[in-house]
Image: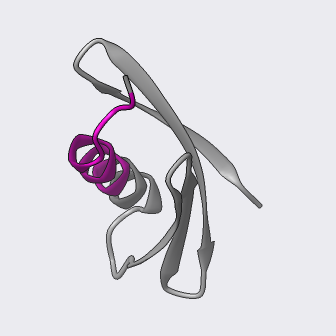
Amino acid sequence: MWQSIEVMVGLSTHRGRFRVEGRRLVLEWRGGRTFEWCGILKPEIVATSRLRQLVSRTPLAA
């Protein structure tokens, strides 16, 4: 089942959703889909951290 997350970067809020498949985390956001190894960390922590990294790297369209 998909779970929603939100992160604040600067003054804007970015949304995504994630689910866990085995020990892999699947994260979908406006930039596409990415997979992360979850290990022993909580999936919410991994998803929030990864989404924040992805949003920070992606240039915003003017």
Question: Which of the image's four quarters has the N terminus?
Answer: bottom right
Tell me the residue at 45%/31% (across/down). Answer: 14
> Vertical placement of 18 versus 3: above or below?
below
Of 42 and 29, the residue lying toward us:
29
**Residue 21 is covered by the magenta coloring:** no
Instruction: Determine whether 54 is above or below 39 in the image.
Output: above
Q: Position of residue 5 (x, y in %)?
A: 52, 39
Magenta residue span? 49-61
Q: Is residue 27 left or right of residue 48?
A: right
Picture layout, residue 42 above or below residue 49: below
Position of the C terminus, as image quadrant, is top left
Give the residue at the far front of this rendering: 62
- Report x, y in % for residue 50: 32, 57
Residue furthest out toward the bottom: 22
Please tell me in which quadrant of the rendered image residue 11 appears: top left
Q: Residue at x 23, y 42 (%)?
A: 56
Residue 52 magenta: yes
**Count of numbered badges drawn on the protein:** 0
Q: Looking at the image, which residue sits at the far right?
A: 1
The image quadrant of residue 8 is top left
Q: Is residue 53 left or right of residue 35?
A: left
- Name the residue nearer the viewer: 60 or 44: 60
Here the colouring is one colour
* Camera-nearest residue between 3 and 33: 33
- Residue 36 relative to residue 18: left or right: left
| Residue at the (33%, 77%) spot, across then down | 40
50 relative position to 20: left or right = left
What type of secondary structure mainly makes up the magenta span? helix
**Who's the residue at 32% across and 68% down the image?**
41
